[in-house]
Image (cartoon, rainbow, N blue to C red):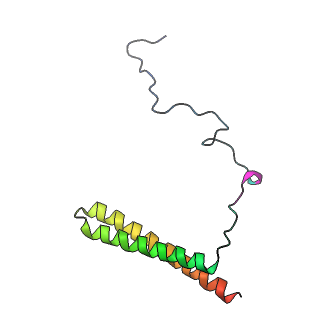
Amino acid sequence: MRTPTTPRRVHIQYFTGIGTGWTGIFGVAKFRAMTPLNLSDDELMDAAQAARIACVQAENDSDKQTSPRVKAMFDSSARRWRELAEKFERARMRAASSR
């Protein structure tokens, strides 16, 4: 029985049962890694070029910002795009050297 001084339980989120996507018990046997992509030389070059374009766009958007916090978000995004482009270029070089 609830008295006026007893606090009421307030839940922010609904209860998620065990075994759902968020609370499931994942064993090693159930883990499946993504299969590697077999991209051609042209596809790797296109992906690297697209990442470079996205990097330049994020840098341009960063220059337009006055807020340091928003500018840092765009700079971080540009850095991630740059790193992704470098990964595609390294994969392209590895593929070319293995032929």
Of the 4 image quadrants, the one containing the C terminus is bottom right
Above/below status of 17 relative to 92 = above
Considering every residue shown, the one lying at the far left of the view is 66
Res. 96 image quadrant: bottom right
Q: Which stretch is magenta?
A: 29-33
Q: In this view, does 23 lie to the left or right of 53?
A: right
Res. 4 image quadrant: top left
Considering every residue shown, the one lying at the far right of the view is 29
Above/below status of 3 relative to 33 = above
User: Percent position (x, y) of residue 57?
Assistant: 36, 70
Q: Is residue 3 visible?
A: yes
Q: In this view, does 65 lie to the left or right of 50?
A: left
User: Percent position (x, y) of residue 37?
Assistant: 66, 69
Q: Let me know if residue 32 is in the magenta part.
A: yes
Q: Which of 73 and 85 is in front in this view?
A: 85
Above/below status of 54 relative to 11 = below
User: Percent position (x, y) of residue 69?
Assistant: 29, 61
Residue at image point 42% right, 74% down: 53
Q: Let me know if residue 25 is in the magenta part.
A: no
Q: Nearer the viewer, residue 23 or 47?
A: 47
User: Percent position (x, y) of residue 17?
Assistant: 63, 33
Q: In this view, does 27 lie to the left or right of 20?
A: right
Res. 31 image quadrant: bottom right
Magenta span dominant secondary structure: loop
Q: Can residue 87 be seen in this view?
A: no
Q: In this view, does 73 lie to the left or right of 43?
A: left
Q: Nearer the viewer, residue 81 or 16?
A: 81
Residue at image point 73% right, 50% down: 27
